[in-house]
Amino acid sequence: MALTVGVLYSVGFYLMLQRSLMRVLIGVVVLGHGTNLLLQLVGGRPARVPIVGNSPPDTFADPLPQALALTAVVITFALTTFLLALGYRSFTLVGHDEVQDDLEDRRIARTRLPVATLETDGDDDRDDDADEERRSANGSHEGAR
């Protein structure tokens, strides 16, 4: 059973890392099933209902894994409905459910890259001006030296 839980988690995480929203949705569902199986395995063997007076306390079942499994079912259902709505909206607007890179994120990533020169020409004043322009572009206003 532990191997089954490991396979479910592996497949779920693999699918969640894909660009297609439907694959992400299937990954969330598989991961939810893996979590439910893991919680039921942690709960141990089936036992008696934990109601005082019906049986001795040493034969009681632990209700916590059952409550956590119920919570996992609700969370998986909520994520499934959200991803279905997101996939439907993406399909109606764009025509596919492929998640694209954000152009603004790319622009910000390019501005944060350090600028390195391969050779110096001995003009320190120009390098100081370039450093100050880089600092002002990155939002850091330390002032002149």
Image (cartoon, rainbow, N blue to C red):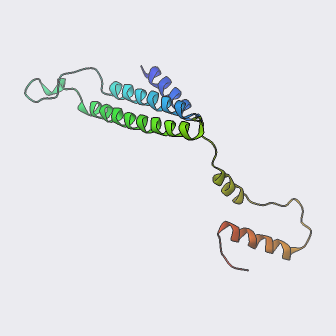
Viewer-side residue, 77 vs 84: 84
Hey, which residue is sitting farthest left in the picture? 53
Viewer-side residue, 24 vs 112: 24
- Measured as percent of width and height from the top left, residue 28 is found at 46, 32
Which quadrant is home to the N terminus? top left
**Is residue 62 shown left or right of residue 51?**
right
- Measured as percent of width and height from the top left, residue 133 is found at 75, 71
**Is residue 68 shown left or right of residue 108?**
left
**Is residue 58 shown left or right of residue 39?**
left
Hey, which residue is sitting farthest front in the picture? 92
The quadrant in which residue 14 appears is top right
> Disc count in the image?
0
- Measured as percent of width and height from the top left, residue 51 is found at 12, 29
Seen in the picture, residue 84 relative to 11 is either above or below; the reply is: below
Seen in the picture, residue 2 relative to 92 is either above or below; the reply is: above
Which quadrant is home to the C terminus? bottom right
Hey, which residue is sitting farthest right in the picture? 121
- Measured as percent of width and height from the top left, residue 16 is found at 53, 34
The quadrant in which residue 123 appears is bottom right
Q: Residue at x 71, y 60 (%)?
A: 111
Seen in the picture, residue 25 relative to 141 is either above or below; the reply is: above
The quadrant in which residue 15 appears is top right
Seen in the picture, residue 86 relative to 127 is either above or below; the reply is: above
Q: Residue at x 66, y 76 (%)?
A: 142
Q: Residue at x 74, y 73 (%)?
A: 132
Viewer-side residue, 55 vs 5: 5
